[in-house]
Image (spheres, rainbow, N blue to C red):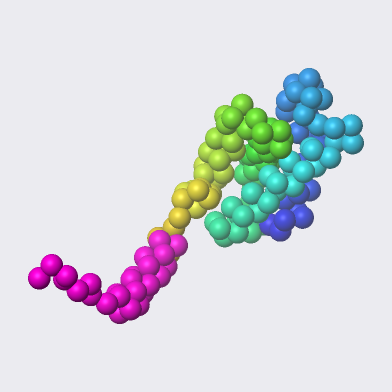
Amino acid sequence: MDYTGIQALITDTDISNAADDEIIRSMSDETRNYLETARNSASAWAFAISRRCGVGDELSADELAVFKIALIKRSLYELYAIHDVEIDASDKHDDAQNLMVGLFGECARLDQSSDKDTRSIVQASMSYDQKLSRRIKPIPAYWE
């Protein structure tokens, strides 16, 4: 599934329908640019997860419905984040994350590194330490 395809799965109306009208009115401007920005951010999040998990276009109708719900919840979280009140939408963030993990497994957790990521970091730090230890000269003991 490409980014444009993910973007097209939900509309600004879907996001508006998922929240109270008063909240949407207070968090979106008259041109509804904030809704579009939130939807784009949620789409980028979902695209990153789909790439990391190796998801193609093979989602069933049920999986696609859950995917859309996760996108809507993440869009609402992003809308709150635009106004720096994302703490009020932490439940939406967690719901979206849990839905994606339910669909695709632990690879959907972008906040955790994989074994491959960890190995490269450890390997880089070990090589840096080896180079650094060759450059450091021993400190002479002045008190002897």
The residue located at (65%, 30%) in the rendering is 85
Q: Is residue 44 left or right of residue 93?
A: right
The relative height of residue 24 versus residue 12 in the rendered view (above or below) is: above
Front one among 143 and 4: 143
Q: Residue furthest front?
A: 143
Query: Is-magenta flag for residue 124?
Result: yes
Against 128, residue 74 (above or below) is above
Residue 41 at least partly seen? yes
Magenta stretch, residue numbers:
117-144
Q: Which corner quadrant of the image does residue 131 belong to? A: bottom left
Q: Is residue 52 left or right of residue 65?
A: left
The quadrant the N terminus occupies is: bottom right
Residue plotted at (85% across, 36% down): 32
**Relative to residue 138, is residue 60 drawn left or right?**
right
Magenta stretch mostly in which secondary structure?
helix
The answer to which image quadrant residue 38 occupies is top right
| x and y percentages locating residue 101 in the rendered image | 52, 44
Which residue is rendered at x = 80% and y = 42% of the image? 36
Looking at the image, residue 29 lies above or below residue 143: above
Whether residue 72 is visible, yes or no, is no
Say which of 123 and 139 sits in front. Answer: 139
- Residue 144, image x, y percentages: 10, 70
* Total numbered badges shown on the rendered structure: 0
The residue at the far bottom in this view is 134
User: What residue occupies the far right of the structure in this picture?
Assistant: 31
Residue 87 percent location from the top left of the image: 59, 30
Above/below status of 121 relative to 8: below
Residue 117 falls in image quadrant:
bottom left
